[in-house]
Each structure stands twice: as structure tokens, then as C-alpha cells.
Image (cartoon, rainbow, N blue to C red):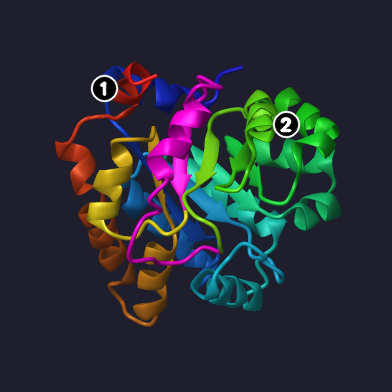
Amino acid sequence: MSNRIDARFNELARERRTGFIAYITAGDPQPSLTAPLVLEIEKRGADFIELGVPFSDPLADGAVNQRAAERALAHGVDVRRVFGIVTKIRKSSEIPIIIFTYLNPVLSYGYARFARDAARAGVDGILSLDLPPEEAARYEAELARRGVNGIFIIAPTTPADRMKLIARHARGFIYYVSRTGVTGVRAHLAAELAHRLRLVRRMTHTPIAVGFGISTAAHVRAVARLADAVVVGSALVSEIEHHREKSDLVTRVGEKVAQLTAPLRTGGRGRAQEVNDR
């Protein structure tokens, strides 16, 4: 069963280019703006969209993303409405869409129903942050039955044997967390990032996306030499927050994406170099 995530990574590999994954919270600052934001972000250079399901107890999210979730929850955005937003996006775009969520909303919705409605809406992958692979058998089976990729996270503190386990379960790509702590803008990337990514590379051929703390074009350029995709979230969510009352919000966010993706349009791709370093 074809999947837009797999197809896009294959395209990126052929083009020897690193992809850009843009995260925003679905329904922030209001539900009617999410689809226009996604379409503008795609037009400005994003290869994938990660839509956060607003949740009241987002353990891995920093203050910026928490406030975005609160704004979306205030508009009554839940899993069902997120799928409705994806359905609306699919009328105009085939960009790969990943749902970023915690397990609680998935459990509440029900594994089978969640996988079915995600697939029907046009979702390509689910990143359930707090679901360990040891307890994911039924979840993975339901997603696989619907052709939706189950994406897992590797953290800087993940030991090598657990990296191997996660790599065996990951579909679509592995999300590597660039540093310890919660989401949010940071001045510097972790010094050990390159070393850690080389360890993961030795265990899998699944593409690796790096996120958490990447907020500038310089960060994007640096990570692009190491990863198959770069994830930027808080910097975009912060842009939405600062301009949420302005009529040109969508354009301003698009301009931010254009700034961040500029290094990927002019630079090469790092994976081949890393593979050769094995």
C-alpha cells in the first residue's frame, strides 16, 4: 500500500536533498486557519506537515506549544476535528501529513477507529510520543492495516539496545530528538548530535528526521548535513502566536518557512556522506 511519506523520502533520496518537516498545532490560532496555513507552508518549501493534536497534558512540549494547544482546545479542537481539517487539506494538497499526538487521545478514540479515520482523512503517519514499542502491537497492526506509518522516537538518552528495538518498529521515518528536554527554541544544537545519528544509521536504513530546538536557518543547514529531514516546530508556532491577530498571519508564517528552508534549496544532502562514514 503506497504511502506519501515513503514516496517523498524516495524523491528526496533521488534528488539528494534533505526534507523539511513543518510542525504546527491543528486549530491554532483557530480551526479555519489551519488548512490555509498548511497550504502556504507547503508552497514556501515544506516537504511534510506535522499536525499536533491539542492535548491538555503535553509532557514533551514547551511553553510555546502548550499555549498553542490551549488556544486550539479553547476552540473545541479534538481528534475528530483534526481529521476534518486533514480532509479539507486533502482537497488541495498531496503533501505527506503526520499526526503528532500523545497516546491518551488515541486510546480514548480507539485504536481501530483512529487508524480508520486517519486513513480516510488522508493522514500518512502517526507519531504517538509516549507509546513504547513494547506495548504498540495492536496500534501498529491497526495502522499497518490502513497503510498508515507508525513513527517512533529515539532520544539522546536512548541506549543502543533500545535504539535497535525502536528502529525495528519504525515505519516511514525515525524521529530523533536532538537534545534532552521539551520542545522549544534553543540557541545551540547538541554537541553530540552527529555521533548519535551515526549510531542510529548503523542500525537501520529507515530515514531519520531530527527535531526539537531547531529554530534558525543555520540550525537547518547544520542538521541537513546529518539527517534525511529537519523538523521545525516551536519557531513556526511562535510566529503564529505573535501574529495571530493580524490579517497577514498566513503570509508571515509562509515567509518564515521560506527563510528556514532556504539552506535546503541551495545545499546538498547529508545522508550519503554519513553512510560513507560508517
- 206 up-or-down from 125: above or below: above
Q: Nearer the viewer, residue 21 or 156?
A: 156
Name the mark on residue 143: 2
Q: Position of residue 41 (x, y in %)?
A: 34, 52
Real-space Cα separation, disc 2 to disc 1, in angstroms: 29 Å
Left/right placement of residue 35 relative to residue 257 reads right
Please name the residue shown 53% across and 41% down the image.
Answer: 175
Which residue type does callout 1 highlight? Answer: Glu
Please name the residue shown 21% across and 30% down the image.
Answer: 268
Left/right placement of residue 263 relative to residue 207 reads left
**Which residue ends up furthest to the bottom in the rendered image?**
245
- 214 up-or-down from 119: above or below: below
Please name the residue shown 27% across and 45% down the image.
Answer: 222
Q: Which residues are magenta?
A: 182-211
Residue 195 lies in the magenta-colored region: yes
Q: Earlier in the sequence, mark 2 or mark 1?
A: 1
Name the mark on residue 15: 1
Left/right placement of residue 24 relative to residue 228 reads right
